[in-house]
């Protein structure tokens, strides 16, 4: 049984949560809060989350690429899977599509239970 599918799902959720937090919470607080406010200071300190997202995204791309090679998806679908980690909230939808597709086309890759 492949360990790539559970790793992909975990990384997809992690990348999605980090990107959603960074783009929907930290960035607005940093740039839209009043100068010198505690919200702006929190937004600046939360910028480290962008670095975390970057590192996790690199691992996500590697795992997605290996999963693509194993499942033989079409190139446009593989590119959609890879790019979805750069657009806030899209990765959650794509993860559901990938999960359904793997369970339908490659049940041997998806863990049972």
Image (spheres, rainbow, N blue to C red):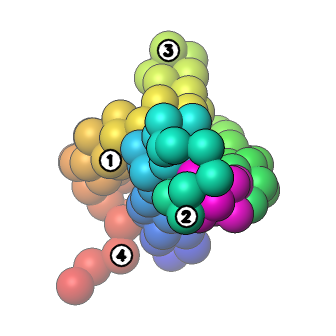
Q: Residue at x 55, y 56 (%)?
A: 37
Q: Nearer the viewer, mark 3 or mark 2?
A: 2
Q: CA distance from mark 1 to mark 4?
A: 20 Å
Toward which corner of the image does residue 65 lie, by quadrant?
A: top right
Callouts 3 and 4 close, C-beta under 8 Å: no
Q: Which mark is residue 92?
A: 1
Q: Which residue is mark 3?
A: 76
Whether 80 is drawn above or below 109: the answer is above
- Name the residue at 35% across, 75% down: 111
Is residue 92 visible in the rendered structure shown here? yes
Instruction: Depth check: give the residue in front, 39 or 92.
Output: 39
Q: Residue at x 26, y 48 (%)?
A: 96
Residue 53 included in the magenta stretch of the image: no
- Give the prevailing secondary structure in the magenta stretch: helix
Q: Residues within 10 Å of mark 2 (few under 14, many from 20)?
A: few
Measure the alpha-carbon separation of dots 2 and 4: 46 Å
Residue at 27 percent across and 79 percent down: it is 112
Mark 3 and mark 4: span between their CA atoms?
26 Å
Structural crowding at the residue carrying mark 3, measured as other residues with C-alpha within 10 Å and reported as few (<14), some (14–19) or many (≥20): few
Identify the element where label 2 is drawn: helix
Mark 4 is surrounded, within 10 Å at the Cα level, by few (under 14), some (14 to 19) or many (20 or more) other residues, namely few
Q: Which badge, 1 or 4, comes first in the chain's sequence?
A: 1
- The residue at which mark 2 appears reads as 38
Rendered position, 9 above or below 25? below
How crowded pointer 1 is (Cα within 10 Å; few <14, some 14-19, many 20+) is rated as some
Q: Nearer the viewer, mark 3 or mark 4?
A: 3
């Amino acid at each position: 049984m492949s360990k790539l599918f559970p790793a992909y799902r975990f990384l997809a959720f992690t990348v999605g949560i980090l990107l959603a937090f960074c783009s929907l919470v930290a960035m607005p607080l940093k740039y839209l809060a009043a100068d010198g406010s505690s919200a702006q200071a929190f937004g600046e300190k939360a910028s480290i989350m962008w670095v975390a997202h970057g590192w996790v995204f690199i691992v996500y791309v590697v795992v997605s690429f290996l999963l693509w090679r194993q499942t033989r998806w079409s190139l446009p679908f593989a590119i959609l899977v890879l790019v979805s980690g750069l657009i806030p909230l899209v990765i959650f939808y794509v993860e559901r599509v990938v999960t359904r597709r793997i369970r339908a086309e490659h049940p041997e890759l998806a863990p049972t239970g």
